[in-house]
Amino acid sequence: MKWPVLLAELIEGAGIANPVSSPLGRSAEAVLVMARAYESDGRTFLASGDPVNALASFWYGLGWLHFGIAYGLIVRELNPACPFRDPCEILPPEYSLKLNEKTNRYERLLNTARCSVSCAPEMATGVYDFAERILLITAVYAEKGRGERECGRMEDALAAFSYGHGWLDAGVTTGLFRIQAHREIFTV
């Protein structure tokens, strides 16, 4: 499976762009902590024979990390390639039921999360523009997930929903969004 290695390599090469004592440095540290936590969770799920939850964890962590890189919180010598350039590995058939249930649940979760936030920064600022970009990114991955699900590629659908939600959750945690409803589905 490529996604455990991909996330681990990205984390390994990541650095914090600002002094850790600054607000942006603390935000970067929070992003790295979450990416590492989801990478660790994913490895634990894989070791316990649960590739469905592992897939969701790794892609959620990738969303967090890519958010941090795009926001300028995290630096890397090389920018990461698009993790969606290749399809996800197909899980064995015995995981189909769990995969379908989790994919459908994560689609609902992402849609609920998207409707539960509003941009926090003032409209005339660059930070507002970035918050709007995150909303666009989450919409794109929600649509990608729907398309993958409709084509029967449930692994890719779950990856897209998890990845998009990772971006949005990271945006909430770093203060780019106000939570209007369903606070319990966010990390803050």
Image: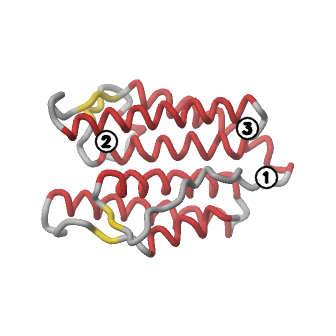
Q: Residue drawn at (36%, 57%), measured in percent from left and top?
A: 69
Q: Quadrant of the N terminus?
A: bottom right
Q: Is residue 119 above or below residue 29?
A: above
Residue 46 percent across, percent down from the top left: 67, 65
Residue for badge 1: 90
**Can you name the residue that lies furthest to the right here?**
93
The answer to whether residue 38 is left or right of residue 134 is right
On the image, which quarter does residue 172 sit in? Answer: top left
Task: Tell me which amino acid carries mark 3.
Answer: Asn
- Disc 2 and disc 1: Cα gap in Å? 32 Å
Secondary structure found at label 3: helix
Do labels 1 and 3 touch, CB within 8 Å? no
Task: Point out which mark residue 1 bears.
Answer: none
Q: Nearer the N terminus, badge 2 or badge 1? A: 1
Q: Quadrant of residue 68?
A: bottom left
Instruction: Name above or below for residue 176 compared with residue 2.
Output: above
> Which residue is situated farthest in the bottom direction here?
12
Of badges 1 and 3, the one in the foreground is: 1
The residue singled out by tag 2 in the image is: 172
Q: Are marks 3 and 2 in contact (CB under 8 Å)?
A: no
Snapshot colouring: secondary structure
Task: Give the crowd class for mark 1: few <14, some 14-19, many >=20 residues within 10 Å.
Answer: few
> Residue 122 location in percent, x, y?
15, 31
Q: Are marks 2 and 1 in contact (CB under 8 Å)?
A: no
Q: Residues within 10 Å of mark 3 (few under 14, many from 20)?
A: some
Type of the residue with mark 1: Ile
Q: CA distance from mark 1 to mark 3?
A: 13 Å
Residue 95 shown left or right of residue 85 in the figure: right
Residue located at (44% from left, 69% from top): 11
Q: Which residue is mark 3?
A: 100
